[in-house]
Amino acid sequence: MSRVEQLRSRLRLPVIVAPMFLVSGPELVIASCAAGLVGSFPAANARTIDVLDDWMRRITRAVGDAPWALNLVVHPTYNPLFPEQMDLLDDHRPPIVITSLGQPGDVVQRVHAYGGLVFHDVTTLRHAEKAIEAGVDGLILVTAGAGGHCGDLHPFVFVPQIRQHWDGAVLLAGAIGDGAAILASEALGADFAYMGTRFAATQESSAADEYKQLLLGQGAADIVVTDRISGVQAAFMRGSLTRVGLDPDNLPPLRGPRRPDLPDHVKPWRDAWSAGQVVGLIDDIPTVAGLVDRLEHEYQHARDALCRDAGTPQR
Ligand SMILES: Cc1cc2nc3c(=O)[nH]c(=O)nc-3n(C[C@H](O)[C@H](O)[C@H](O)COP(=O)(O)O)c2cc1C
């Protein structure tokens, strides 16, 4: 059995709960692992190295040998704490490290040395090729409709294009909100569905209550994709922009490459809240355990419906 098959065999559903800045902390990771999925969090959510050390210890103690993932931003401009975060890898050995923004090569060496897996975020074929050269174990294909730093490609094209020349793990990210979409990811050729926004609207997420309420109230048409908030193309809820006095249809232009020009009281992610198009499907804030029960039910239902239809004589 390959390592990817081994990982899949340990999960209740082929789902990785994606890391979300200011939204995923130890509670969400521990609840996701307890429900039979892979939980993850961005290292940047722990404001200091001591806090990160403490979170990783808490998670390891709570989940035992269940797989969980740490997300590292590997671009030094965006992550000055990167060297110290790398040093903690040897101490806590997260079974999976998710790398984003930058070259994952150094992380691959470090994580492979203790037997872990590295999955890297990509939005284009070019980025995917570079990550494969760097030796990653899995590619996270971030597609159109995703929350966070979303892509432009449609999954029906991106997944098969990658599959033509890559037999490592494929994780599909973007607008996966229910069990049928998890099954659809597998049908396309992905090994795992990578779900962010849907899990931001759970009891265990660290999003503020007002943020969670907005996830209930906004629809897919309320998602604004722009580089004018964080400097890089990302998806934000229209209601979170108007809430802090910004006009979503007339955002201040960049001051230079990747340099947003926001009023002092507005911080990207803290005040401008990210979500993907899947907000259009969210109408409750369940516990993670309750959500995963429902996803499993929907997944089985979709599978049964397909099998039933496959057995129906063609007209
Ligand atoms: C609020 C929010 C914050 C995010 N922060 C990060 C992050 O810190 N690191 C990262 O690699 N991806 C981040 N993402 C992207 C997710 O990991 C994932 O790719 C995305 O949520 C998948 O699309 P979905 O939201 O449609 O499920 C974020 C997404 C959201 C919604």
Image (tube, rainbow, N blue to C red):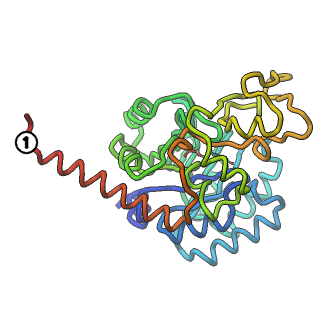
Considering only vertical position in the picture, is 44 above or below 219? below
Local crowd size for mark 1, using a 10 Å CA cut-off: few (<14), some (14–19), many (≥20)? few
Looking at the rendered structure, the kind of residue marked 1 is Pro
Q: In this orientation, which residue lies closer to the viewer: 312 or 93?
A: 312
Query: Where in the figure is residue 236, as x and y percent of width and height?
Result: 68, 37
SS at badge 1: loop
**Does the beta carbon of the residue at mark 1 sit less than 8 Å from ligand 1?**
no
What count of labels does the image hold? Answer: 1
Query: Where in the figure is residue 46, as x and y percent of width and height?
Result: 77, 60
Q: Which residue is mark 1?
A: 313
Query: Where in the figure is residue 122, as x and y percent of width and height?
Result: 57, 37
Q: Residue at x 90, y 40 (%)?
A: 265
Is 188 left or right of 248, judged from the image as shown? left
Is 127 left or right of 185, judged from the image as shown? right
Query: Where in the figure is residue 275, as x and y percent of width and height?
Result: 63, 43
The quadrant of the rendering that contains the C terminus is top left
Is 180 left or right of 77, judged from the image as shown? left
Q: Residue at x 89, y 33 (%)?
A: 263
Residue furthest toward the right? 264
Q: Residue at x 58, y 48 (%)?
A: 197
Q: In this orientation, which residue lies closer to the viewer: 83 or 48?
A: 48
Considering only vertical position in the picture, is 304 above or below 114? above
Q: In this orientation, which residue lies closer to the viewer: 40 or 92?
A: 40
- Location of residue 59 by image quarter: bottom right
Is 48 left or right of 110, judged from the image as shown? right
Q: In this orientation, which residue lies closer to the viewer: 300 or 10?
A: 300
Q: Residue at x 63, y 73 (%)?
A: 60
The quadrant of the rendering that contains the N terminus is bottom left
